[in-house]
Amino acid sequence: MYYYPVMLDLKRKKCLVAGGGKVALRKVIGLLRAQASIIVISPEFSKHFHRFSNKVNMIRREIEESDITKDLALVIAATNIHNVNEMISGRANALNVPCNVVDQPDLCSFIVPAIVRRGDVTVAVSTNAASPRLSKYIKNKVSNVIGSEYSGIASCMAKVRLILREHCNNQAMRFALWEQIFETDPVVFIQKHGLAEYQKYIDNILSEYIDTDQHIGLENT
């Protein structure tokens, strides 16, 4: 099966997690990073769950079919009871609510890839559910290549985009500027000279394309 890769905006969206163990907790932490509004239902919760009791709505009971409603952005089933997972999947699919059942791709309408995060940089790895172990292997390989420098680079590029939106409407000029910025490998530059020097390097390039009196230094944005 081929899955369509997508990044979801779940900010303030209602999401439901069924389960109270370690796997469910990992899913909750991921949803919290996305600033989702989270409901977790389980008859029992692992002790680490209580660190997040003020951030999620924890309901201590068995999940019921009526808990799965049309207004949910997504549902994650992280229980170890097959018939419960089947019920959750069936109800969610009937309501066209995206559903992930951990380790049971046949019950999923979406799967969650292995993730490498460096600030605003997110690299997702999937084998289309063929082998989660291979996904983890590739993730570890990628993690060794995508270092902490990428977080700073992404932050710089976001600032450059804001500056260009305010001060440069010429598409050809924007293209030329981006080409010049990436003539130098940002990772190698930061490893040799540091992030502050890289910001100065970008400032100098920006000053070639934007009038000095309009220029905004990266460190001031």
Image (spheres, helix red, strand yellow):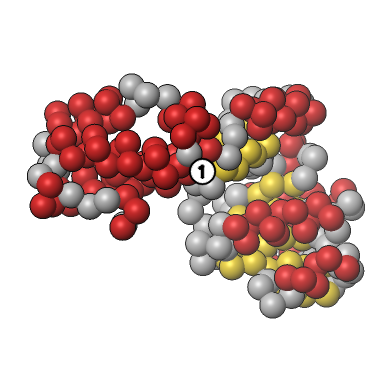
Q: Amino acid at mark 1?
A: Ser
Residue 37: percent from the left, percent from the top? Answer: 59, 68
In this view, the residue in front, 105 or 179, is 179
**Vertically, is 205 above or below 91?**
above
Is residue 114 shown above or below 72? above
Q: Residue at x 12, y 47 (%)?
A: 212
Look at the image and tell me in which quarter the C terminus lies: bottom left
- Whole-percent x, y for residue 134 in the image: 75, 24
Name the residue at 48% across, 39% down. 194
Crowdedness of circle 1 by 10 Å Cα count: few (<14), some, many (20+)? some
Q: As drawn, is 155 to the left or to the right of 204?
A: right
In the image, farthest residue toward the top: 183
Q: Residue at x 21, y 44 (%)?
A: 164
Q: Left or right: where does residue 200 sit relative to residue 43?
A: left
Is residue 200 placed above or below 144 in the rendered structure?
Answer: below
- Give the secondary structure at mark 1: helix
- Residue 136 position, x and y percent, is 75, 31
Decide if residue 53 is on the left or right side of residue 164.
right
- Where does the image place residue 203, in percent across and percent down from the top left? 27, 42
The answer to whether any part of residue 182 appears in the image is yes
Nearest the eye: 123 or 149: 149
Label 1: which residue?
Answer: 151
Above-or-below relation of 37 to 102: below
Find the residue positioned furthest to the bottom: 54
The quadrant in which residue 122 appears is top right
Q: Which quadrant of the view contains residue 52?
A: bottom right
Q: Is residue 128 visible?
A: no
Which residue occupies the foreground of this view, 170 or 14?
A: 170
Q: Quadrant of residue 137?
A: top right
